[in-house]
Image (cartoon, helix red, strand yellow):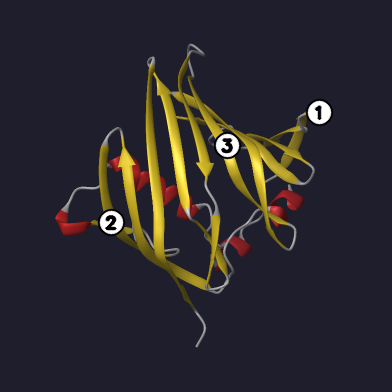
Amino acid sequence: MDQATKTRYVWNGDVSGVSGEFTWSKDGKTGSATFHDVFHQHDSLKITGQGGSEVPEQIHDHVASMINHRVPPGPAAARRPRPEAVVLVEDDERGPLIMTVGDAMQSTQRIKDGKLVQVNRRMGGKRFTIDVTEFENVSDGRVYPKSFTVTWWDAATGKRSERQTYTTEGLEPTDGQMFPKAEKVVSEKDGHTSTMEISYSNIKFETNRR
């Protein structure tokens, strides 16, 4: 787990916020917006549609998740004890299945070649699995999850309800950090397929440097 933490790409610790613009398309609808986020503050992400236009909730949630997964740990994280983890199943091919002891979301994960390749969790009445299918080498041995799938099941019945395929289409170096050029999400649910695409521009990082 420690090695997977070291190889996971996050922005530098002195980065305190990020802003920029993006265009989006989803199932035939299009739009553009600006965004600004100050890290480690509650509900700090602000997304504003150009010309007062509405930004779909799925677009907002995706941008929020993408940023949250790259935010460097805050000072409080260093003071928290690392949760205990135990190996449930040894697996040389896919990586050992590791359980986080006492986790409220019943989290398990797989680590292979020092990289986090799978996450399994329960959220409400659903279970989901994230499988990383491709990494992009960034710097200093760190990697960015370029392609991954998220599969959702009903926790009670085990029936699959949705599958999403995420692809990052290139990374752009900005202010010493890496930020996606564009992203694509293809969702399959109830026999229907929908596609969401986002392209980013004018990215600016804020730092704690004085």
Q: Nearer the viewer, residue 189 or 105?
A: 189
Mark number for residue 93? Answer: 1
Q: Is residue 101 visible?
A: no
Q: CA distance from mark 2 to mark 3?
A: 25 Å
Q: What's the residue at 67%, 36% (across, down)?
A: 109
**Among the two numbered marks 1 and 3 on one chain, the one whose residue lies closer to the N terminus:** 1
* Three-letter amino acid code of the residue under disc 3: Phe
Left or right of 148? Residue 48 is left
Which residue, given by chain and number where applicable, does mark 3 sit on? Answer: 148
Look at the numbered disc 3 and give the secondary structure of its residue.
strand
* Three-letter amino acid code of the residue under disc 2: Ala
Local crowd at mark 1 within 10 Å, few (<14), some, or many (≥20)?
Answer: few
Q: Nearer the viewer, residue 195 or 140?
A: 195
Provide residue 94's location: percent of width, then percent of height: 76, 29
Proximity of marks 2 and 1: CB atoms separated by less than 8 Å: no
Among the 4 quarters of the image, the one containing residue 38: bottom left
Which residue, given by chain and number where applicable, does mark 2 sit on? Answer: 33
Q: Is residue 170 visible?
A: yes
